[in-house]
């Protein structure tokens, strides 16, 4: 029999990255959550063009978000990390505009799409949190566009390394100055608008410079300050965020 994590015992809620629930919000989320789903590596969680009846919060594991072009090519647009909310597009727009795949085994908290309106009716603070999540995704998309348009290849990779390292560190996945990075180089190349060959060269150059090493699914940052300066982003902690 599968075991479902009680929202009161959620390991993510204990992390400083996420804003705490009020007692009323906790009780609502206990009833709003319909269960948990565990998916293997390589599984498709949500599919582009489909009307998913379920929304998810990533409890553990990593994934990719990608768009399939009309000619069959696949474009990775960003990644899914613990604490991310998946399926909001389907919940609001009726169908998914991208696909979510598991890169590692993942555990997901599940919510019924049909009950999203209940959240807006009865839990205005939680509804605001949902709006905040959507706004952050829009902001990240804007930052990504700036990266693709204004940063050179080395700056793009430094930006990605720092952003990923900070986020995964904030959810407790850092160990010995490193975090898991099990994505293919092709995935990161896609997300950064670079060729695979160019990505390989930049990864090697950052390693030779003593700034970062990405090898065997593990990313180590040897000089976070220098990488942040190279990427043109400030040295700061991840902003606290709500969790669904």
Image (cartoon, rainbow, N blue to C red):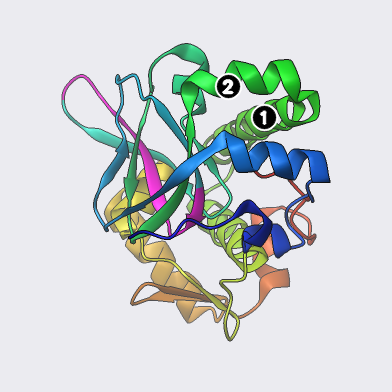
Q: Nearer the viewer, residue 208 or 114?
A: 114
Q: Secondary structure at mark 2?
A: helix
Q: Nearer the viewer, residue 188 or 3?
A: 3
User: Main SS of the magenta segment?
Assistant: strand
Task: Using the image, determine if residue 125 lies above or below residue 243.
Answer: above
User: Is 203 positioned to the left or the right of 225 in the image?
Assistant: left
Q: Which residues are magenta?
A: 58-71
Residue that label 2 marks: 116
Q: Residue at x 66, y 23 (%)?
A: 119
Tell me, yes or no, whether the highlighted magenta stretch contains residue 200: no
Decide which of tag 2 and tag 1 comes sooner along the chain: 2
Q: How many numbered discs?
A: 2
Task: Using the image, determine if residue 121 lies above or below residue 209.
Answer: above
User: In the image, residue 229 lies at what x, y percent?
Assistant: 72, 61
Q: Residues within 10 Å of mark 2 (few under 14, many from 20)?
A: some
Callouts 2 and 1 close, C-beta under 8 Å? yes
User: In the image, residue 201 lies at what x, y percent?
Assistant: 36, 64
Residue that label 1 marks: 130
């Amino acid at each position: 029999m599968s075991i479902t994590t009680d929202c009161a015992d959620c390991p993510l809620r204990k992390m400083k990255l996420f804003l705490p629930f009020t007692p009323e919000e906790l009780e609502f989320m206990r009833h709003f959550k319909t269960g948990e789903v565990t998916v293997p590596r390589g599984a498709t969680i949500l599919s582009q063009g489909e009307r998913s009846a379920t929304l998810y919060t990533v409890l553990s594991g990593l994934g990719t978000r990608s768009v399939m072009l009309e000619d069959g090519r696949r474009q990775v647009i960003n990644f899914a990390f613990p604490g991310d909310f998946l399926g909001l597009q389907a919940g609001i727009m009726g169908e998914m505009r991208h696909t979510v795949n598991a890169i590692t085994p993942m555990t997901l908290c599940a919510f019924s799409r049909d009950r999203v309106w209940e959240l807006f009716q009865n839990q205005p603070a939680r509804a605001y949190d949902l709006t905040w999540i959507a706004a952050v995704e829009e902001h990240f998309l804007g930052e990504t566009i700036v990266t693709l348009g204004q940063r050179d290849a080395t700056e793009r990779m430094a930006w990605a390394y720092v952003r990923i390292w900070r986020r995964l560190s904030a959810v407790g996945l850092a160990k010995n100055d490193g975090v898991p990075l099990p994505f293919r180089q092709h995935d990161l190349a896609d997300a950064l608008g670079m060729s695979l060959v160019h990505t390989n060269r930049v990864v090697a150059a950052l390693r030779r410079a003593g700034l970062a090493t990405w090898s065997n699914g593990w990313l180590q940052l040897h000089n976070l300050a220098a990488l942040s300066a190279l990427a043109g982003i400030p040295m700061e902690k991840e902003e606290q965020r709500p969790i669904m």
